[in-house]
């Protein structure tokens, strides 16, 4: 529990609003964000880096609702994007294009053109072919594209393999041994301007050591590049700072900043770029869901709820742990070992396996914590389930920031075939 998600007189509140009231008004499943918690995390990161030259670029992929991005913009921060859609969202929310960095291994020609037209701050390039495509598009537009190269330092981030992005067999980044050659090649291309060096080794890191090991490697590379006349002015060290889901004890914002700046303090005329996502929004949101059934078999006690893997895929995809609690502690029943599942027609549709939880009855509510990062943003319409609503609680006010999808939304953009009668007859035969 945090100051913003806590029990008051036995009833779970988000800030000053009872969760039960929100569920009654907006239905379930329901993502509920604490604006105060979100803002606090942003402010702490900003304060932690203090007078160090830096730019915080919130990682849009973590949670991309434009109301959240609007908050990011209100603090004067930038955005880390990985698609044309995220560029659209960031600009729509008021994040200045000059504070947007564009990451990702598969930027298309159209996406590059859109980003150039918008005047983004920097492209983080990940391959030779990508470099050449961007140079051609920029030349056609008579523009100069500001670039960095994302290098792969082969540092073990000590995290889940699916979210480790800096190992040598990762699809991300350029092998660090090849980086000098690409930088040298880019230097010769008039439509490209080298301004940065980029790296992101993974997500949900709970130690500062992988970060500092990576930065030391990047500083060595920067020295070599400067000897070749390539002046790196921006060092993008990505994001990846973890949060507490269960028993993890991740570094605080200040411990993280202290570890990084201790290594980078000797750098002159270099601005750090940081791309926090999970550490800002992860524990700023809960997923509220209602119990549909208790199903007891000789082998298991299943609690069937109305949220599912299409709403929160992390447990199914990563085997991730999310704390689950009843929203009402009054008259709590004894603890039982249960498996919490959703209605999806997949054996992998679970939110918790063999978890000791207070018994919850049909119709009661439970809250799933740590749902902010990669919760709604990875949700889908699998099994033709409308996606959940999103609510932002801020300053004692609850605002619906995304309406619950309706059945009509599921077929938006689809069309029925206009089948001639003879085709229908042929199909019957």
Image: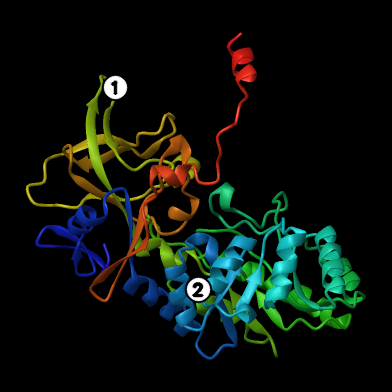
* Residue drawn at (64%, 19%) of the image: 423
- Residue 397 at x, y percent in the picture: 25, 72
* Residue drawn at (73%, 77%) of the image: 196
* Residue drawn at (65%, 72%) of the image: 101
Q: Residue furthest right?
A: 188
Looking at the rendered image, the quarter that the C terminus falls into is top right
Q: Do labels 1 and 2 touch, CB within 8 Å? A: no
Q: Residue furthest top?
A: 429
Residue 205: in sight, yes or no? Answer: no
Up the image or down, 239 lies above or below 347; here it is: below
Return the mark for residue 254.
none
- Residue 217 at x, y percent in the picture: 71, 70
Sequence-earlier tag: 1 or 2: 2
Up the image or down, 353 lies above or below 299; here it is: below
User: Is 349 on the left or on the right of 362, as rendered?
Assistant: right
> Of residues 66 and 349, which is closer to you in this image?
66
Return the mark for residue 93.
2
Q: Residues within 10 Å of mark 1 (few under 14, many from 20)?
A: few
**Total labels drawn:** 2
Q: Residue furthest left?
A: 331
> Of residues 51 and 367, which is closer to you in this image?
367
Question: What is the C-alpha distance between the residues marked 1 and 2?
Answer: 50 Å
- Residue 13 at x, y percent in the picture: 20, 63
Mark 1 lies on residue = 299
User: Is 178 on the left or on the right of 309, as rendered?
Assistant: right
* Residue drawn at (60%, 61%) of the image: 85
Q: Secondary structure at mark 1?
A: loop
Single out the mark in the foreground, 1 or 2.
2
Residue 200 quadrant: bottom right
Up the image or down, 50 lies above or below 256; here it is: below
Q: Residues within 10 Å of mark 2 (few under 14, many from 20)?
A: some
Q: Secondary structure at mark 2?
A: loop
């Amino acid at each position: 529990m945090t100051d913003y998600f806590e029990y008051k007189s036995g009833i779970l509140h988000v800030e000053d609003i009872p969760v039960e009231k929100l569920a009654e008004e907006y239905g379930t499943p329901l993502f509920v964000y604490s604006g105060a918690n979100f803002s606090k995390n942003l402010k702490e990161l900003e304060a932690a880096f203090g007078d160090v030259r830096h730019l915080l670029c919130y990682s849009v992929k973590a949670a991309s609702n434009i109301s959240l991005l609007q908050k990011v913009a209100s603090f004067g921060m930038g955005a880390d994007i990985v698609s044309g859609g995220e560029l659209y969202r960031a600009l729509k929310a008021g994040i200045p294009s000059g504070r947007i960095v564009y990451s990702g291994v598969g930027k298309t020609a159209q996406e590059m053109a859109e980003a150039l037209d918008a005047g983004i701050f920097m492209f983080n390039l990940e391959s030779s072919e990508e470099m050449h495509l961007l140079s051609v598009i920029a030349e056609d537009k008579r523009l100069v594209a500001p670039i960095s190269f994302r290098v792969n330092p082969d540092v073990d981030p000590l995290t889940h393999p699916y979210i480790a992005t800096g190992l040598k067999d990762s699809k991300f980044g350029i092998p660090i041994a090849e980086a000098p050659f690409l930088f040298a090649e880019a230097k010769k291309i008039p439509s490209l301007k080298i301004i940065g060096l980029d790296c992101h080794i993974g997500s949900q890191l709970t130690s500062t050591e992988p970060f500092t090991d990576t930065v030391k490697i990047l500083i060595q590379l920067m020295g070599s590049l400067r000897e070749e006349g390539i002046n790196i002015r921006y060092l993008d060290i990505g994001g990846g700072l973890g949060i507490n889901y269960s028993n993890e004890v991740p570094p605080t914002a200040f411990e993280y900043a202290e570890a990084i700046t201790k290594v980078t303090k000797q750098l002159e005329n270099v601005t750090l770029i940081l791309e926090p996502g999970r550490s800002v929004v992860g524990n700023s949101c809960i997923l509220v869901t209602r119990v549909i059934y208790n199903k007891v078999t000789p082998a298991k006690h299943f609690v069937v709820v109305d949220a599912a893997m299409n709403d929160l895929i992390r447990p199914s995809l990563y085997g991730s742990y999310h704390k689950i609690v009843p929203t009402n502690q009054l008259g709590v029943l004894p603890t039982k070992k249960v498996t919490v599942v959703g209605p999806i027609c997949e054996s992998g549709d679970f939110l918790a396996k063999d978890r000791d939880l207070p018994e919850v009855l049909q119709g009661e509510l439970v809250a799933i914590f740590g749902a902010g990062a990669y919760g709604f943003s990875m949700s889908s319409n699998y099994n033709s389930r409308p996606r959940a609503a999103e609510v932002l609680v801020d300053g004692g006010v609850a605002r619906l920031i995304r309406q619950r999808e309706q059945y009509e939304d599921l077929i938006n953009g689809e069309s029925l075939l206009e089948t001639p009668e003879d085709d229908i007859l042929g199909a019957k035969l």
